[in-house]
């Protein structure tokens, strides 16, 4: 369970980075699109990098293969949508997962308002790093995954 | 409170591996290991299932004793 969750957490973090990369590219493209709408420019161009798309696809495939290989979870339609790091084969694993979800919930309760407060500083930082808000929002799933992962590790050791 | 048990002892008497017992009571081997190390307190259902495998009464397998140190 511990080793599986380490691999899955690394995959999740890499996926967050790819999403951030992709969203940043969209952000830049949308600046040109916004000019087209509001400043009535003649044309606009949006460049979408293929690499993060491919990386997300590869990570998704890797996560699916690992889940099929390592997880003894029943293969139902519903279970397909569960995060791959969830391991609930018996009552002990369900208890550990429940505790990890509880900790994750507690962390997010305090972390999300903090993130909202940081986002309120957008007018200050947007001149230096316009798409920083995207990365700040992506800290939410990062904290969620890490608090989940460290609870699992502590419980399993 | 800590719940102590004789799972390891009875498993040895019955010549079962952790994997065998886990399969019989439908849990993972790690759960049996955690019960034996007294890191995990099994549910009443799992406890009764283990008792059934060893053909003993609950009080012969599990009993209260000592203070539990929370992780």
Image: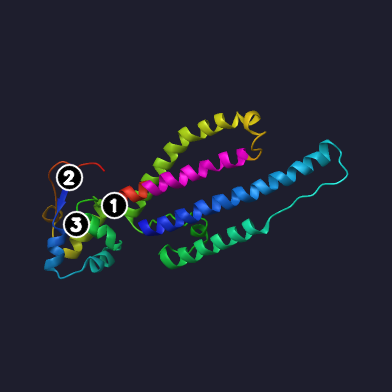
**Circle nearer the N terminus (3, 2):** 2
Does the segment drawn in magenta span residue A142?
A: yes
What's the mark number on residue B2?
A: 2
Name the chain letter of the residue that bears numbered label 3: B
Magenta region, main secondary structure? helix
Does the segment drawn in magenta span residue B39?
A: no
Secondary element type, mark 1 = loop
Q: What residue is drawn where x is 80% and y is 39%? A: A35
Q: Nearer the viewer, mark 3 or mark 1?
A: 1
Rounded to the nearest angstrom, the CA distance separating label 3 from label 1 is 15 Å
Figure check: B48 above or below A116: below
Is A149 or B24 nearer to us in this picture? A149
Give the x, y percent position of residue B49.
23, 60
The residue that disc 3 covers is: B36
Q: Which of the 4 image quarters holds residue A69? A: bottom left
- The residue lying furthest to the front in this view is A128
Is A44 or B45 nearer to us in this picture? A44
Figure disc tally: 3
């Amino acid at each position: 369970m511990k080793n599986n969750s380490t691999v899955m957490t690394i995959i999740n973090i890499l996926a967050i980075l790819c999403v951030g990369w992709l969203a940043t590219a969209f952000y830049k493209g949308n600046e040109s699109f916004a000019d087209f709408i509001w400043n009535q420019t003649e044309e606009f161009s949006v460049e979408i990098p293929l690499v993060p798309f491919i990386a997300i696809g590869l990570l998704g495939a890797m996560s699916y293969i690992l889940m099929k290989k390592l997880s003894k979870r029943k293969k139902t339609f519903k279970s397909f949508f569960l995060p791959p790091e969830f391991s609930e084969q018996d009552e002990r694993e369900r208890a550990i997962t429940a505790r990890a979800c509880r900790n994750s919930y507690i962390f997010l309760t305090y972390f999300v308002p903090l993130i909202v407060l940081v986002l309120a500083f957008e007018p200050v930082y947007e001149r230096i790093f316009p798409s920083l808000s995207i990365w700040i929002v992506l800290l939410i799933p990062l904290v969620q995954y890490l608090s989940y992962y460290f609870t699992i590790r502590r419980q399993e050791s | 409170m800590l719940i102590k048990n004789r799972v390891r002892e009875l498993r040895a008497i019955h010549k079962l591996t952790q994997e065998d017992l886990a399969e019989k009571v439908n849990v993972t081997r790690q759960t049996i290991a955690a019960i034996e190390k007294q890191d995990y307190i099994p549910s009443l259902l799992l406890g009764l299932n283990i008792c059934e495998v060893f053909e003993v009464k609950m009080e012969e397998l599990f009993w209260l004793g000592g203070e539990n140190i929370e992780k």
